[in-house]
Image: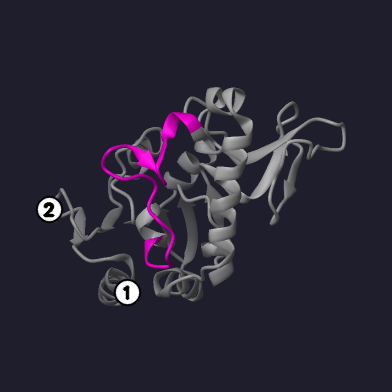
Amino acid sequence: MKHLVVLTGAGMSAESGLKTFRDANGLWEGHDVMEVATPEGFLNNPELVLEFYNQRRQQLLEVEPNTAHYELARLEEQFKVSIITQNVDDLHERAGSNTVIHLHGELLKVRSIITPDNVYSWRKPLHLGDKDKNGHQLRPHIVWFGEAVPLIETAANICSQADILLIIGTSMQVYPAAGLKDYIPAQTHTYFIDPNPAVSSNNALTVIAKTATEGIKDFIKALNSNH
């Protein structure tokens, strides 16, 4: 069974109603990213940061996976599928995908500010005073700017075993995730679904200039004819 590795980003979940990470002027839901997505922001104003993620969490619980999420899950019938996502939502899992690596953390989990391995599932609002089993404050289980990406080596190892690569919903411009392309074997064919691609198709790359839900249909047709 061939190994299909899928790299997904914000465009994957946009059609479910989740807003993409940030707009052109660098604001995220009206906030400066440095205020709500850095350790310094959390130290300076923890209430703001917790409320920001409480709103994101509530929004996530109100949306559903889209066609593209379900189609990726269905591909497990034909391929070994590994999804490496920059998204912090659980839509891949809800659609039925079984192997999902979250590079940037998970919105429906929280962790101790002192002991990062103390991670808890969390679907309600998170407040100051919510503590782990050792009495330490909990924070969103999110990789903020300036923090290490713990699963990047795991993701690189998966990429090195790819027979087919699909990039969907991400421009792959943000490091360290962008560096994962360097681990893909030379003979591996890459498919890139993006409504506004900055690259063109070539012998090693098939560009599908469509949204995730539309592009996935073309991808599956190409898979069935080429593999």
Q: Looking at numbered disc 2 in the image, what kind of residue is underneath it?
A: Ser
Q: Residue at x 75, y 47 (%)?
A: 120
Magenta part of the chain: 14-35
Q: Is residue 31 a member of the stretch shown in magenta?
A: yes
Q: Position of residue 19 (x, y in %)?
A: 40, 56
Locate the C terminus and report the quarter of the image it occupies. bottom left
Asked if residue 170 is positioned above or below residue 96 in the image, the reply reads: above
Q: From the viewer's perspective, is 109 left or right of 36?
A: right
Q: Position of residue 191 (x, y in %)?
A: 27, 59
Q: Tag 2 or tag 1, which sits nearer the N-term?
A: 2
Q: Locate residue 28: give its quadrant.
A: top left
- Judging depth in this view, the residue of 166 and 52 nearest the camera is 52
Residue, disc 2: 200
Residue, disc 1: 220
Secondary structure at badge 2 equals loop
Q: Residues within 10 Å of mark 2 (few under 14, many from 20)?
A: few
Secondary structure at badge 1 equals helix
Q: Looking at numbered disc 1 in the image, what kind of residue is underneath it?
A: Ile
Disc ID at residue 185: none
